[in-house]
Amino acid sequence: MREIWTRAGIVSILITIISTYALGYLSIYLFESYGWLLFILIPFLIGFLPPYIFGIRKKVTKAQAYKLSFFTALCTILLLFVLAIEGLICVIMASPLLLLSIWLGSYIGFIISERKFLKSKIVNSLLVILCLGFMSFDYINLPAELTPVKTKIVIDAPIEKVWENVIQFDKLEEPEDWIFKTGISYPVDAEIKGNGVGAVRYCNFTTGSFVEPITTWNKPTLLQFDVKEQPIPMNEINPFYEVHPPHLEGYFKSYKGQFKLKKINSNKTEIEGTTWYKVSISPEFYWKSWSDFIIHRIHKRVLRHIKKESEENLNL
């Protein structure tokens, strides 16, 4: 680790942190984008710049390159917490993308530094072009279509009884699912005001309420609703402060949902819950996998409660 505490090591780390924070600020606060620039290019630069800058002054080995890059990454992440910019859970969720990009950047930085087959002016020009390209790509690459997530369960109860527990339900038990112990918001109960189309359903989560005007009321087979208002998707965990990063507001948005009930026989009902949403964070394929997983867990929590209530209260 001695190379880190040399003049060349400290300079390379400081230049990297200042440069990547400036890019991150532009991405989040100017372009209002959490995308490829933030999750791919910036960690790539965190990996690339320290060995590349260090190598301009001194010879760098591959081991030294990795040490410089990952120590810089650690400092960058700690600053996110200390400056109350980000929380622990989102960093953990993004870590596969971050680690892969940092490693790749470090390796390429080492190769260029060792072989010096590109002049500094050419490398700097390529980096500027990369930054502009990623910013442009994020700006135009916005999600166009809603993503549906569907979850099914079979309940040993008549369809009419299940319907009663769909439109509103009492307080759910404390969750055992690990994902809800991380600060991710989860449903606690639901109530409805009114009856039929035009009624408003309130699905209450730990961070607030989803306000859901009913658009289809086909008792007892189909309940559809829009999402007029929704709370933040999670309470971020930070080792030092309470934080509220911008991605909690509007980057994940639910647009509508439905419960579809199907009568299997007089005492058995299939129920399918569906949520349509958009996630305005890229790479979309990566963050949608997280969103789909979390929404499925939310669906299962609600559907299992409906199953429990419907089957327990059959004879009441």
Image (cartoon, rainbow, N blue to C red):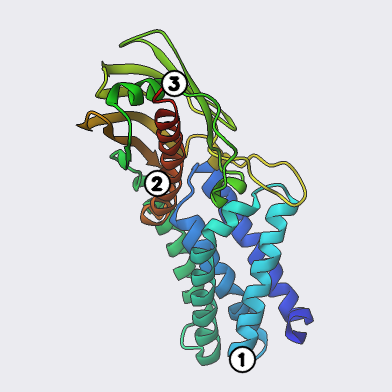
In this rendering, the answer to whether 7 lies above or below 277 is: below
Q: Horizontally, is 209 left or right of 61 in the view?
A: left
The quarter of the image holding the C terminus is: top left
The quarter of the image holding the N terminus is: bottom right
Callout 1 secondary element = loop
In this rendering, the answer to whether 165 lies above or below 86 is: above
Q: Earlier in the sequence, mark 1 or mark 3?
A: 1
Tag 3: Cα neighbours inside 10 Å, few (<14), some, or many (≥20)?
A: some
Pointer 1 and pointer 3: residues touching (CB < 8 Å)? no
Pointer 1: what residue?
A: 61
Pointer 3: what residue?
A: 168
Please name whichever residue, 29 or 206, is drawn nearer the observer in this view of the structure: 206
Q: CA distance from mark 2 to mark 3?
A: 41 Å
Residue at point 61%, 47% (across, down) = 181
Snapshot quadrant of residue 262: top left
Residue type pointed to by label 1: Thr
Q: CA distance from mark 1 to mark 3?
A: 63 Å
Q: Earlier in the sequence, mark 2 or mark 1?
A: 1
Task: Name the mark on residue 139.
Answer: 2
Pointer 2 and pointer 1: residues touching (CB < 8 Å)? no
Give percent across and percent down for residue 205: 54, 30
Residue type pointed to by label 2: Tyr
In this rendering, the answer to whether 180 lies above or below 114 is: above
Q: Horizontally, is 138 left or right of 274 in the view?
A: right
